[in-house]
């Protein structure tokens, strides 16, 4: 290879033409952009030969490692016969097989699948389906959506509207519909001596009162089951979901479960809703659905909702929503290959062993004066940095950047959410690699909290 083709070469060309997501581009005047040449398992390698352990699964999408041979081969084989065809009036084997598989493995009652191409698009679809369902049912007054404080559901306008993270939402406020926001059951805010379950039950009271008094105008409640990821990996007890399902049924309100980030084994079960023993009215899936290979999302719902749209064309009750790449054959094949890997071994059981090792690996931070909380839900572990009084550091101090840079200098890709350092690695990580990750993160937290 031409020795001139190095990190600096691609960095310079990139900064002349690309605009990166969720990035203040001016930061790259001092924060080096890392061009990646290849990936293998949990490792990424740049053009200068440096390696980085992908602790965040490349934005939470990668389940079984980079360049997974099984998924790669299945996509390559599919590309030889059909890459894509319009899914309006046509169909194909991968789309059908994947829909059947998803209906079989998700909670009971989810019998219909609508494909899209991103998590945000899936949320948009669920919101529109819920709104449209009530309209088709002769209840056009049910137009409002309820979300939790600190929630995040995507960055297209509809999905952004039902989120509550100011960093993403505030700028675009004039463009957005207004949701009804209720306090999150986030366990971080519980009082001394209060258990996760007790706190979740107490926090459910505002939701219950809202549904009691305003259900006639509410179409749906949308939640991220168990973990509010972009809101700082805040976690809560599944009893909240149990009570929410009961209340939504009692008051005739849809429940939308956004499992885009937490689905496919992240929380210790295949789907987070399983831990509450519930089925939502709409289940949104993406990210790990294709093992991190290709953009695909799916919204699952039940037969009763499907039938509300099943009319003569002249009734104008069809769900007129589409994406050009809906049900793309390569994407569906990647998803099928990913689900096959779950079938070939006890992935969930193995993950539980890895999760226990991950928690033990950071145990020395339990008494750290500037780690206010260490929390875990399956293969998601978060450590929250705070001052000596347990108060979050001001966001302007950007202490997470110190952890990030220390990680890059020590073979680890850590991308903290503000003051929250977290692990969400691919499931093929080994105990030794977890130990490496923990050591680097602990060192980075020491550096970031040193005043």
Image (cartoon, rainbow, N blue to C red):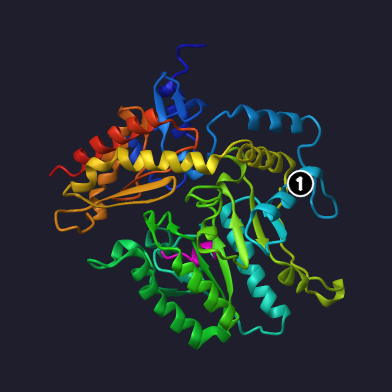
Q: In this view, does 423 lie to the left or right of 112?
A: left
Q: Is residue 47 above or below residue 203?
A: above
Tell me the element at label 1: helix
Which stretch appears magenta?
Answer: 158-164
- Identify whether 392 is placed above or below 193: above
Image quarter where the C terminus lies is top left
The local crowd at label 1, few if under 14, some if 14 to 19, many if 20 or more residues have their Cα within 10 Å, is few
Viewer-nearest residue: 190 or 451: 190
Q: In which quarter of the image is residue 205?
A: bottom left
Q: Please state the horizontal and vertical placement of residue 69, each as a whole percent of the image.
A: 62, 27
In the displayed structure, does residue 303 sit left or right of residue 43?
Answer: right
Depth order, front residue of 442/196: 196
Find residue 285 and report its image quarter. Answer: bottom right
At horizontal 18% and vertical 47% (from top left) the residue drawn is 367
Residue at (33%, 30%) from the top-left corner?
436
Q: Left or right? Give the position of 303 relative to 239.
A: right
The answer to whether residue 58 of the structure is visible from this angle is no
Q: Which residue is drawn at 33% across and 41% down?
A: 27
| Depicted 334 relative to depicted 3: above or below | below
Quarter of the view holding residue 107: bottom right
Residue 315 is left or right of residue 432, and the answer is right
Query: What residue is pinned by disc 1?
Result: 97
- Which residue is nearer to you in this view: 14 or 145? 145
Exactly how many numbered labels are in the figure?
1
| Above/below status of 291 relative to 219 | above
- Find residue 431 and report its horizontal and vertical position in percent: 39, 31
Measuring 28% from the left and 39% from the top, which residue is drawn there? 403
Across and down, in percent, residue 430 comes to: 43, 30
Task: Tell me residue 152's x, y (percent).
Answer: 46, 60
- Give the residue at the far bottom of this rendering: 213
157 inside magenta stretch: no
């Amino acid at each position: 290879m031409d020795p001139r083709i190095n990190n600096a070469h691609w960095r310079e060309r990139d900064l002349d033409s690309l605009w990166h997501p969720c990035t203040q581009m001016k930061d790259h005047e001092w924060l080096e952009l890392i061009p990646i040449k290849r990936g293998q398992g949990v490792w990424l390698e740049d053009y200068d030969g440096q390696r980085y352990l992908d602790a965040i699964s490349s934005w939470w999408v990668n389940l079984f490692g980079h360049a997974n041979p099984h998924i790669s081969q299945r996509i390559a084989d599919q590309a030889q016969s059909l890459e894509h065809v319009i899914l309006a009036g046509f169909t194909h084997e991968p789309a059908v097989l994947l829909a059947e598989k998803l209906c079989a493995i998700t909670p009971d009652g989810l019998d219909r699948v609508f494909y899209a191409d991103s998590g945000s698009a899936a949320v948009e679809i669920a919101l529109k389906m819920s709104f449209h369902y009530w309209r088709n049912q002769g209840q056009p007054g049910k137009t409002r959506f309820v979300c939790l404080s600190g929630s995040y559901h995507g960055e297209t306008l509809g999905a952004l509207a039902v989120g509550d993270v100011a960093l993403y939402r505030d700028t675009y406020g004039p463009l957005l519909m207004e949701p009804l926001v209720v306090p999150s059951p986030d366990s971080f805010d519980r009082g001394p001596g209060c258990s996760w379950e007790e706190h979740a039950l107490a926090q459910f009271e505002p939701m219950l009162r809202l549904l009691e008094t305003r259900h006639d105008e509410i179409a749906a409640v949308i939640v991220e089951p168990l973990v509010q990821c972009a809101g700082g990996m805040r976690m809560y007890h599944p009893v909240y979901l149990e009570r929410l399902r009961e209340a939504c049924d009692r008051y005739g309100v849809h429940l939308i479960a956004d499992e885009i980030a937490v689905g496919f084994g992240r929380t210790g079960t295949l789907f987070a809703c399983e831990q509450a023993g519930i089925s939502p009215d709409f289940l949104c899936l993406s990210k790990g659905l294709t093992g991190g290979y290709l953009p695909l999302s799916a919204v699952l719902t039940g037969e009763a909702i499907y039938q509300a749209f099943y009319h003569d064309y002249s009734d104008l009750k069809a769900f007129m929503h589409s994406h050009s790449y809906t049900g793309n054959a390569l994407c569906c094949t990647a998803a099928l290959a990913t689900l096959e890997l779950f079938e070939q071994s006890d992935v969930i059981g193995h993950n539980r062993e890895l999760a226990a090792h991950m928690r033990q690996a950071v145990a020395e931070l339990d008494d750290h004066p500037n780690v206010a909380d260490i929390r875990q839900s399956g293969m998601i572990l978060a450590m929250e940095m705070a001052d000596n009084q347990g108060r979050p550091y001001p966001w302007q101090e950007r202490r997470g950047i110190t952890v990030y840079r220390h990680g890059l200098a020590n073979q680890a890709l850590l991308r903290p959410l503000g003051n929250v350092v977290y692990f969400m690695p691919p499931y093929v990580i080994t105990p030794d690699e977890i130990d490496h990750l923990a050591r680097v993160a602990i060192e980075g937290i020491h550096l970031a909290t040193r005043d």
